[in-house]
Amino acid sequence: MPPAAAMSAQIMCQFGAAPGVLVVVPKGAPVNLENKFAATIMDFVPMTNIMPFGICNSPMNPAAVAAKAVGATAPCIPITTPWTPGAAKTMINNFPALTATSKCSCTWAPMGISIVNPGTTKEMAN
């Protein structure tokens, strides 16, 4: 069983320049893990749950490629999908709980966003 993820989990994109922090906005009755809102696979919304990772260096992002060609940089603008996989059995308001092993896809980084620190130390999700 991997650790469950919660508000303030540290996340990182493989093509981003800076780490981020997961923002959890409860959907339904809030569930707390170690005094933080528990995260689900649905906590993936850009600019709500997942903020930019600084600069985008993805070779799949046309803006990043064009900027690099002229010696500039392109800002990270996440375009994300739900986290996968979620917990097999642990559900929070009808959605699988988010775990430390879950990944999130961005249009420019398929399965490239990972959880570096889940924000919990004792809670596990199965």
Image: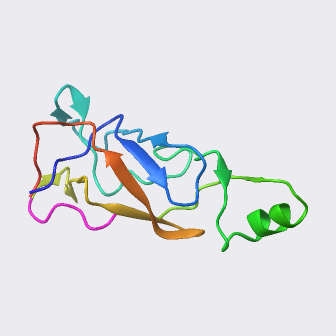
The answer to whether residue 17 is left or right of residue 61 is left
- In the rendered view, would you say 55 is above or below 10? below
Q: Which residues are magenta?
A: 82-89
Q: Residue at x 81, y 62 (%)?
A: 68
Residue furthest right in the image: 70
Residue 27 spot, x, y in % from top left: 31, 44
Q: Quadrant of residue 30?
A: top left
Quarter of the picture containing the N terminus is bottom left
- In the rendered view, would you say 81 is above or below 46? below
The answer to whether residue 22 is left or right of residue 107 is left
- In the rendered view, would you say 94 is above or below 105? above
Residue furthest front in the image: 71
Residue 87 spot, x, y in % from top left: 17, 61
Residue 61 spot, x, y in % from top left: 69, 69
Q: Quadrant of residue 8?
A: top left
Residue furthest top in the image: 35
The answer to whether residue 120 is magenta is: no
Q: Residue at x 64, y 45 (%)?
A: 54
Count the numbered circles shown. Answer: 0
Residue 55 seen from this side: yes
Q: Quadrant of residue 32?
A: top left
Q: Residue at x 91, y 62 (%)?
A: 70
In this view, the residue in front, 73 or 107, is: 73
